[in-house]
Amino acid sequence: MSLWREGRWDFFDQHPEMIKELHQAGRAFVVVNLNIDYLAAAVHGDDLEIITGIVEIGERSGVCHHRIVRKDGTVIARADLTFVLLDMRANKAAAIEAEVREALVALTLPKEAFSA
């Protein structure tokens, strides 16, 4: 689980202005679902790459796709993570609109882009 979180934080760390604006508006992305497929074993010392990207944006939620790939090209695991834009004051999902939607759509890739 920590590898998925690390990949996601790294992805959003590359877009600090968007995150800053959301926090100033009292909003944040929160995870609501995570589906993981474990495909191969990884052991201590394996050199692993975490690939993360947004593959879908809906009205109130989005989906990030993750892959963990060993240096030899073997896909260790893949996951789809659903997130919502939380209105922290109201404590409920908010619509993904305007500049936030535009920014997320611009970052969206087809899931096929993650194929090895």
Image (cartoon, helix red, strand yellow):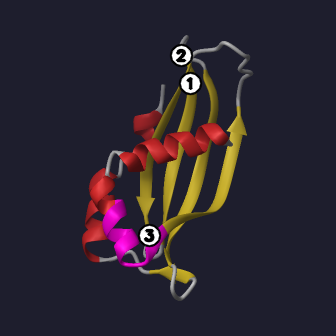
Check disc 3: other Cα within 10 Å, few if <14, some if 14-19, many if 20+: few
SS under mark 3: loop
* Label drawn at residue 58: 3
Q: Is residue 106 left or right of residue 42?
A: left
Dots 2, 1 in contact, CB < 8 A? yes
Check disc 1: other Cα within 10 Å, few if <14, some if 14-19, many if 20+: many
Expressed as whole percent of the image width and height from the top left, the position of residue 40 reads 72, 23
- Magenta segment: 19-28
* Label drawn at residue 69: 1
Q: Is residue 111 visible?
A: no
Front disc: 3 or 1: 1
Q: Is residue 27 magenta?
A: yes
Alpha-carbon span between mark 2 and mark 1: 6 Å
Indicate which disc, 2 or 3, sits on the residue closer to the N terminus: 3
Expressed as whole percent of the image width and height from the top left, the position of residue 6 reads 55, 40
Q: Main secondary structure of the magenta part?
A: helix
The residue where tag 2 is placed is 73
Expressed as whole percent of the image width and height from the top left, the position of residue 105 reads 31, 60
In the figure, 54 relative to 22: above or below?
Answer: above
Q: Quadrant of residue 47?
A: top right
Alpha-carbon span between mark 3 and mark 1: 28 Å
Quarter holding the N terminus? Answer: top right
Indicate which disc, 3 or 1, sits on the residue closer to the N terminus: 3
Q: Is residue 74 visible?
A: yes
Q: Residue at x 56, y 83 (%)?
A: 92
Expressed as whole percent of the image width and height from the top left, the position of residue 107 reads 31, 51
Q: Amino acid at mark 3?
A: Gly
